[in-house]
Amino acid sequence: MHKITFILLIFMSVPLVAQNPIVPNQGLNDPHIHIFNDTAYVYASHDKSANNKKFIMEDWWVWSSPDLVNWTKKSVLKPQDTYIGKDFTSCWATDVAYKNGKYYWYFSEGNQQTGVVVGDSPVGPWRDPLGKPLLTSELTPTDEYDMAIFEENGAHYIIFGVWEYYIAKLNDDMISLAEKPKKLIVNNPRGPYNLDGKNSEKPTDDKPFVHKYNGKYYLSWGCFYAMADNLYGPYDYKDTVIKQESFAEGYDAPTWPTGFLQGRHGSFFEWNNQWYYAYCDISQTGNRYFRDTFISYVHYKENGEMATIRVDGVGVANYDANSKIEAEDYFKAKGVKKEETNSGFVITTTDTKSYLNFTNVKGLKNTSKLTLKTSAKKEGKFIIKILKDSLQGEMIASKVFEIKQRNQFKEISFELKKLTSKENIYLTIEQLTNNQLQIDSFSFSK
């Protein structure tokens, strides 16, 4: 079968509710997603063409979304508008930071150096305040590219490198270093070229990223990650967030030369009490030099490690009413926490009044019933309301019910008012007695 035919068959197999890739067939890659003013912005590299036979990236892009589903291109940074000053085909990975009313967009000059531009908005316009690289090629023993920016308590840090990683605090001006870069120690590392831990020359990969969750620091390179109690390490390698069982049908191939763990450059981010991983994928293009961006939910186990993610076409903030919807995959939530179970995760209420929001629920036409799989940590009485569009929106179902057998899941069904084919659904939960409700999942039916 010819490659073009194969690619077309993959596109034809994508379900109608598909949202991965987030921007199909555009070559958007190496994504870093940040939330500014309750809007998501992806700062990314850009593969030039589906016909690429090598990496050709002639500019950097910013796209924005109000909901992680609908994306609009907002800004293009050309190398001519930076200290590079000419056409350039190695506009590699990029990241951004906000401080004191300014946005600082850092970019890779191929696999050698890092520059920075500044703007008054998340989408520019941009100017180069240095007229030269921020990180120069002789600065450390590694290569000074594929940077990530980490912010904590108002201070910003830049992390960069390949095979070994370095970190340095930025000055308040965001365009100079406050210290000499320090090497990040990773114990027992693994990577796409080091699956067995024996490749000391290429122990990790390029494209490092750092995020923090529940007091722990996570250093990741693609889908591999390590954890530490201190930002400067040492970090202990833990696992990959992608495994063979991650893939839905049609999303496991084709892949990179060393396998599906290679090339998953991206970032982790949080929005509305939900965590996500944005990363590169080539399953829908068939070309490692023309990559897409996917987003998947991230759920953390009790020990702090990240659970295996799901790689599929449905994506995030986007739901198929013809399939079971996991409660932990909400778009917004308040007054709840995720808890690990033997079979996955549940949502447990933490406040007297809580809510879950599921946007872009598709395939609802002709459905008339919603069934929740629920439990409680002790006997109790609850009221759940189902609303459209907002917490003040039209109520389409409501029920008061009791759970008399703790820690045993039961189904609670709601008769729904007539729905359109796509709705923005809110579930509000009120505890009428002093206990905690757990929701595992829910489904729609006729």
Image (cartoon, rainbow, N blue to C red):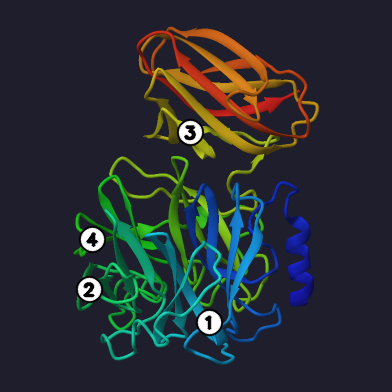
For marks 3 and 1, the one nearer the N-term is 1
The percent position of residue 342, horizontal first and vertical second, equals 39, 34
Q: Name the residue under label 1.
A: 91
What amino acid does circle 3 point to? Ala
Assess disc 4: are there few (<14), some (14-19) or many (≥20) residues with their C-alpha within 10 Å of its C-alpha. Answer: many
Q: Give the residue drawn at x 58%, y 10%.
A: 399
Q: Distance between the residues labelled 3 and 4?
A: 28 Å
Assess disc 2: are there few (<14), some (14-19) or many (≥20) residues with their C-alpha within 10 Å of its C-alpha. Answer: some
Q: Name the residue under label 3.
A: 333
Residue 329 appears in the figure: yes
Q: Name the residue under label 2.
A: 178
For marks 1 and 4, the one nearer the N-term is 1
Q: In the rendered view, would you say 146 is above or below 396?
A: below
Q: Nearer the viewer, mark 2 or mark 1?
A: 2
For marks 3 and 4, the one nearer the N-term is 4
Name the disc covering residue 231, or none. 4
Residue 409 appears in the figure: no
Assess disc 1: are there few (<14), some (14-19) or many (≥20) residues with their C-alpha within 10 Å of its C-alpha. Answer: many
What amino acid does circle 4 point to? Leu
For marks 4 and 2, the one nearer the N-term is 2
Q: Quadrant of the C terminus?
A: top right
Q: Kindly state the secondary structure of the residue where label 1 is placed.
A: strand
Residues at circles 1 and 4 in contact by the CB criterion of under 8 Å: no
